[in-house]
Image (spheres, rainbow, N blue to C red):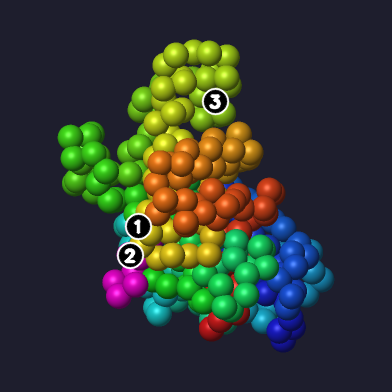
Amino acid sequence: MTRELRAGIDIGGTKTDAVAIDAAGGVLHRVRLATGFGAEAVLGTAAAAVEQLAAAAGVAPEAFGSIGIGVPGAVDPATGRVEHAVNLGLPELELGAEMARRLGRTVRVENDVNAAALGAFALLGGSPAQSMAYLNLGTGLAAGLVIRGELWRGSRGVAGEIGHIPVDPSGPECPCGQRGCLELMASGSAVARQWPTEDPAPVRALFAAADAGDPAAVEVRRRLVANVAAAVRLLVLTVDVDEVVIGGGLASLGTALLGEVRAVLAGWATGSEFLASLQLADRVELVPHGANAAAVGAALVGAAG
C-alpha cells in the first residue's frame, strides 16, 4: 500500500472533484466528474473518481494509503452516515460503509465545509498552534473551525453553523424555521432573492452593475458585504481564531469582495477602540485561488483514520 498517496473526494451538487495528494499535502492529480442525483449516482461517481485518480497515478485503487470524502448534509464522522443532503437526493445514506464495500477498504466521511476548513488550513500552512475559521460563502453560509490544528465540530456537530444565527428578527423566513438568519443576508441565495437576474454568474453581475452605478445593485452589494463582514466579526468574537478564510463560490470574486469586506471592518474599527484592538481587517483573507480546499481536506480527513 502506498501510504504516501492519499485520495480526497469533494462531492458537490453538480460536480465531484477529487485529488491525490502526497505526504506533504501537495496535489499530484485531479479529477472532475458530474455528480448525478441519488444514492447510486453519487456512489458510482465517487468510486469512478478514485479509479481515475489511481489510473492517473499508475497504481491500483487499493494502493491509496487513505481515502476521504467531503459531502454536504449532516454527517456522522464516526460511522460515515450522511443525512439531509437534499441537493444530492440523499435523505440518508451509509456513505462510508457503501464506499468501503465498493473499494474494499475504509473510507472516512466528513461534512464538506469542515473538510474545506481542514484543507484551507493546510494549504495556507497553518501550524498546530494556530486556529482558523473557514467561512464558506456559496448558495448558503456556514463555517468550519480548525482549533489548534484540528477540526472542532462541537458537542452535536453544529459548531460553525453561523448561517442560522438570526440577525434580523423581522427579516424573511429561513428554511430552518427562524427569521432573518445571517445566511439570508450574506450568500448567493441572498443575492438571488434581492437582485434577480438571468446572468449565469449573478453575484459577479451584481458587483459589475454596482460598479456601473446601478442604485439597486449598489444597495444590495452594500448589504451583502456588510453581512459578510458581520460574519467575520462574529467568528472572531466567539472563537477568537487567528484568521478567517473566505471560501465557497463567492470567493471567486477575489479582491473585489475581500477589499470591500476589509473596508467595512476597518470602518467599524474607527468608531470602536475595542474593534480596533482586534485588527479584524488584517485577520481575513481568501482561500488560495484555484485550490480545491474541500478535496484536499477530504484527503486529510481520510489520512486521520
User: Residue 252 location in percent, x, y?
Assistant: 61, 40
Contact, mark 2 vs mark 3 (Cβ under 8 Å): no
User: In the rendered structure, which amino acid carries the disc numbered 2?
Assistant: Val
Q: 60 or 215: nearer the eye?
A: 215
- Residue drawn at 72 percent across, 58 percent down: 30
Is 158 within the magenta?
Answer: yes
- Residue drawn at 56 percent across, 72 percent down: 130
| Residue 207: image tag | 3
Q: Earlier in the sequence, mark 2 or mark 3?
A: 2
Q: Marks 2 and 3, Cα distance to the nearest angstrom?
A: 32 Å
In what quadrant of the picture does the N terminus appear? bottom right
Question: In terms of secondary structure, where does tag 1 sit?
Answer: loop
User: In the rendered structure, which amino acid carries the disc numbered 1?
Assistant: Glu
Q: 230 or 292: nearer the eye?
A: 230
Q: Residue 187: tell me if it is visible.
A: no
Image quadrant of residue 59?
bottom right
Contact, mark 1 vs mark 2 (Cβ under 8 Å): yes
Magenta region, residue range: 154-161
User: Residue 258 location in percent, x, y?
Assistant: 58, 41
| Residue 161: image tag | 1
**In the picture provided, is 63 more to the left or to the right than 226?**
right
User: In the rendered structure, which amino acid carries the disc numbered 3?
Assistant: Phe
Q: Residue 147: tell me if it is visible.
A: yes
Q: 148 or 302: nearer the eye?
A: 148
Q: Which of marks 1 and 3 is nearer the N terminus?
A: 1
List the residue tagged with mark 2: 158
- Residue drawn at 57 percent across, 78 percent down: 129
Image quadrant of residue 158?
bottom left
